[in-house]
Image (spheres, rainbow, N blue to C red):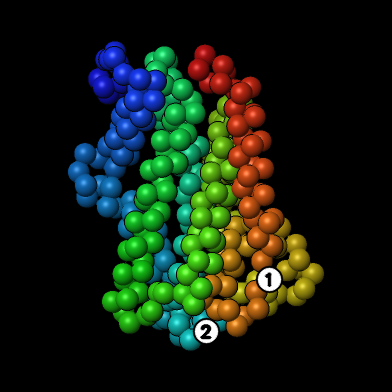
C-alpha cells in the first residue's frame, strides 16, 4: 500500500481524493506493468500486435479486405473499438479482484478502484490508437477518416460500453468470483461476432438483425462508417449510447448491494 494513502494530511476533501486517486493509478501501473516504463509499453503494444498479426495472416493468405482496398485499414477500424471495449470491461473487473485488500483502508472506496482503473485503460487505449495510426502511416496507409468526428464518437462509445459492462462485471464477481473465467470465454464469442474480420451487413438480413443487438458490433460499424461512408452502414447510435449508460447505471446500483460483501 502506498505510504501516500496512509499518511494523514491537512488537505481539502477534493485534494485528498485526487491524492488517493493518483496513488491508486501509480500503484495500478506499477503492479501490473512493472516499475519500468517498458512494462507499460508492452501493455500498450499488445492490442497493436494483435491487430497487425491479424493483418499479416490475411495478407499472407492473400485474402482481400471485405470492404475497400486496404486490409490493414479495414481490420484496424474494426479491431480497435472492439478491443478497447473488451480491455476496459475486463480490466475494470480485474482491478477489484487484484486490489480488494486496499478497501480496508478508510480512504479507499470500491468506486475509487474502479475509477482509477478506468482512467488507466482510457489512457492505454488512446496510446494504442496512436501507435496503430503511426504504424499505418509508416506502411503507407492513411489513418485519417473521411469523417473524423464520427470516428472519435464511435471510439468514445466503445469506451462507454466498456465502462458499463465492466461495472456490471464488478457487481457479478461480488457474488460469483468465477465469472472472470466465464467472461473471458464470453469475450471470445463476442469478439468473433463483432465484425472485426468480416462485414456483418453482408450476412443474411435476419442474421444481421439479431447480430446488431451486440453493441460492440455497432461500435465497430460506427467507427468504420467514418472511413467507408459509401458502405451505407446503418448504426443505431441511440442504442449504443443508451446501452453503455444503462449498463453503467445498473452496475452502480448493484454495487451498492455488494460493497459490504466485498469489503467484509
Q: Which residue is mark 2?
A: 68
- Left or right: where 111 falls relative to 218: left
Seen in the picture, residue 203 relative to 188 is either above or below; the reply is below
Nearer-N-terminus badge (1/2): 2
Helix or strand or loop: what does disc 2 sit on?
loop
Name the image quarter holding residue 166.
top right
Res 200 visible: yes
Q: Nearer the viewer, mark 1 or mark 2?
A: 1
Seen in the picture, residue 168 relative to 158 is either above or below; the reply is above
Query: What percent of the width, then of the height, locates residue 151?
Result: 50, 66
- Mark 1 touching mark 2, by CB under 8 A? no
Farthest-out residue, front: 12
Query: What percent of the width, then of the height, locates residue 152?
Result: 49, 62
Which residue is found at the position 47% from the left and 49% from the top?
Answer: 87
Q: Residues within 10 Å of mark 1 (few under 14, many from 20)?
A: few
Which residue is found at the position 21% from the left and 47% from the top?
Answer: 37
Q: Which residue is mark 1?
A: 234
Query: What percent of the width, then of the height, locates residue 137?
Result: 32, 76
Name the image quarter holding residue 54.
bottom left
Residue 82 — which label?
Answer: none
For the residues labelled 1 and 2, the Cα–Cα distance comes to: 17 Å
Which residue is found at the position 36% from the left and 66% from the top?
Answer: 132
Seen in the picture, residue 8 relative to 225 is either above or below; the reply is above
Q: Residues within 10 Å of mark 2 (few under 14, many from 20)?
A: few
Front residue of this view, candidates 184 and 255: 255
Amino acid at each position: 500500500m502506498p505510504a501516500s494513502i496512509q499518511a494523514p494530511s491537512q488537505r481539502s476533501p477534493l485534494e485528498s481524493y485526487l491524492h488517493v486517486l493518483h496513488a491508486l493509478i501509480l500503484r495500478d501501473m506499477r503492479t501490473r506493468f512493472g516499475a519500468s516504463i517498458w512494462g507499460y509499453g508492452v501493455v500498450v503494444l499488445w492490442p497493436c500486435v494483435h491487430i497487425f498479426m491479424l493483418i499479416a495472416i490475411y495478407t499472407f493468405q492473400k485474402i482481400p479486405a471485405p470492404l475497400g482496398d486496404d486490409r490493414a485499414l479495414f481490420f484496424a477500424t474494426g479491431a480497435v473499438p472492439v478491443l478497447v471495449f473488451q480491455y476496459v470491461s475486463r480490466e475494470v473487473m480485474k482491478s477489484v479482484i487484484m486490489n480488494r485488500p486496499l478497501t480496508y483502508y478508510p480512504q479507499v472506496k470500491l468506486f475509487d478502484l474502479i475509477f482509477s482503473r478506468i482512467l488507466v485503460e482510457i489512457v492505454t487505449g488512446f496510446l494504442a490508437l496512436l501507435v496503430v495510426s503511426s504504424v499505418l502511416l509508416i506502411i503507407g496507409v492513411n489513418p485519417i477518416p473521411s469523417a473524423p468526428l464520427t470516428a472519435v464518437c464511435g471510439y468514445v462509445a466503445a469506451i462507454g460500453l466498456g465502462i458499463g459492462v465492466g461495472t456490471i462485471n464488478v457487481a457479478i464477481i461480488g457474488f460469483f468470483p468465477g465469472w472472470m473465467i466465464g467472461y473471458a470465454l464470453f469475450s471470445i464469442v463476442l469478439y468473433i461476432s463483432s465484425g472485426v474480420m468480416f462485414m456483418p451487413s453482408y450476412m443474411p438480413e435476419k442474421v444481421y438483425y439479431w447480430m446488431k443487438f451486440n453493441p460492440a458490433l455497432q461500435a465497430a460499424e460506427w467507427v468504420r462508417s467514418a472511413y467507408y461512408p459509401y458502405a451505407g452502414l446503418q448504426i443505431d447510435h441511440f442504442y449504443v449510447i443508451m446501452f453503455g449508460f444503462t449498463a453503467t447505471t445498473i452496475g452502480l446500483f448493484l454495487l451498492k448491494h455488494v460493497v459490504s460483501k466485498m469489503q467484509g
